Image (cartoon, rainbow, N blue to C red):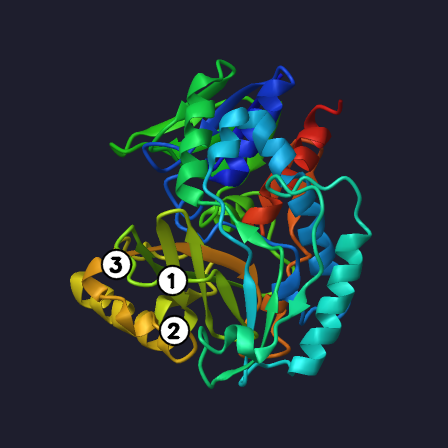
Amino acid sequence: MKTAVIGAGIQGTSIALELASRGIEVDLFDLEDQPLNGSSRHTEGKIHLGYVYANDPCMATADLMISGAKVFTPLLRRWVGPDFDQVPVSEHFEYVIHKDSILSAEALNAAYREIDRRIQGTDNWNYLGQRTLQQAVTLPEREWKNRYGSTVAAVYRTDERAVDPHALADLLVKAIANEPRIRFLAGAKVNSIDRDERSLRTLDQHGSKLIYGPYDHVVNCAWAGRLAIDSTLGIKPTEPWNFRMKYFLRLGASAPVAFQSATIVLGPFGDVVRYGESTYLSWYPAGRRGWTSDIEPPQWPQPPSEEIASQIQEGIIAGLSTVILGANKVKPSNCEVAGGVIYALGSTEVDDPESTLHKRSSTGPITMDGWYHSVDTGKYTTAPLFALQTADRISPL
């Protein structure tokens, strides 16, 4: 059996490695020169437990995140080996409730209690080395007033953490290179799928048109290009969608403040993630620089121009400074500006309480005609879970 996997981000590499472990030959296609050179590397790396999706009243998104978080460590450790244990992990996240949150502190507290109940009802945890997870705890003001400003209504300490996506990406690249059943085809843009021949029509870096196949199965994990490829087989989402370009800042050991990892909720705010000597900083209104509902997004610049990068640096630092004390000490010149494309269902922004951006449960693999599989990764957290589900459809154990 031979399978084509389109897209070599965390989703595509996870599927390729799982299929290879089942004895299946895989051709792995990507636009970049090496795997994991796009959004999967340029992200915060949070392994969600569901707290940020408190505005999904049915808790379906929290349930999905919990399911993804539960298998994240065991599956990645299986694919990349014990070196996974050396990937830098953030300290626990604090959830910082902004006074302008689209949900009240009372409503968020009720949601967190329900999410805690679901986490505690899940057995056999191995969450980044933790075998038990504690409930979210409301911190007394005296414990956080030296970290956060007057825009904050309340703070919760959670057991949620993040992995350094750069370090994990490097391990996955190595695992792909060392797997003899995987052939990586770099610089290949898949333009269409031939339904009858089960083949891929591609364009290489030199503009040459190439055809690969036939394949027993084709898995579409392309991130920015997935919808366009699906459309060549007549597949489109049943709801409105959007692509966004989100930039963030990354600091090295020169960070002037030992930031606490924190997510500011709920609305168009930001995050701080500290893993080892590296720190991730984001502020959504300053970092979100592109939005389209086209079938494929434009080539947003990565990195951005010097002028735009300067605006992003200043905007993220200024935004975080309204919430996190000491953020104004960060010098723009010490920040690397990076970013990645985000895909999600929804036609309105995160400041809309009714936006479907607050609900991410309609993600995962869909299968057509038994051989074509299109995988909406949704979140970094759920990629290994969806890899397992996709592999089970192709070659059940």
Residue 335: numbered disc: 3
10 Å neighbourhood of mark 2: few (<14), some, or many (≥20)? many
Across and down, in percent, residue 32 comes to 34, 37
Report the residue marked by disc 2. 320
Question: Position of 110 compared to 308: left or right?
Answer: right
Task: Pick whichever, 69 or 95, lies toward us.
Answer: 95
Q: Which element is circle 1 on?
A: strand
Question: Position of 370 compared to 307: left or right?
Answer: right
Q: Please tell me whether residue 160 is drawn above or below residue 217 in the rendered image.
A: below
Residues at marks 3 and 1, CA–CA distance in whole angstroms? 9 Å
Looking at marks 1 and 2 on the same chain, the residue that comes earlier in the sequence is marked by: 1
Question: Position of 129 compared to 177: left or right?
Answer: right
Asked if the residues shown at circle 3 and circle 1 are in contact, with their CB atoms under 8 angstroms apart, the answer is yes
Res 219 seen here: yes
User: Looking at the picture, which amino acid does disc 1 mark?
Assistant: Leu
Question: Position of 69 compared to 270: left or right?
Answer: right
Q: Which element is circle 3 on?
A: loop
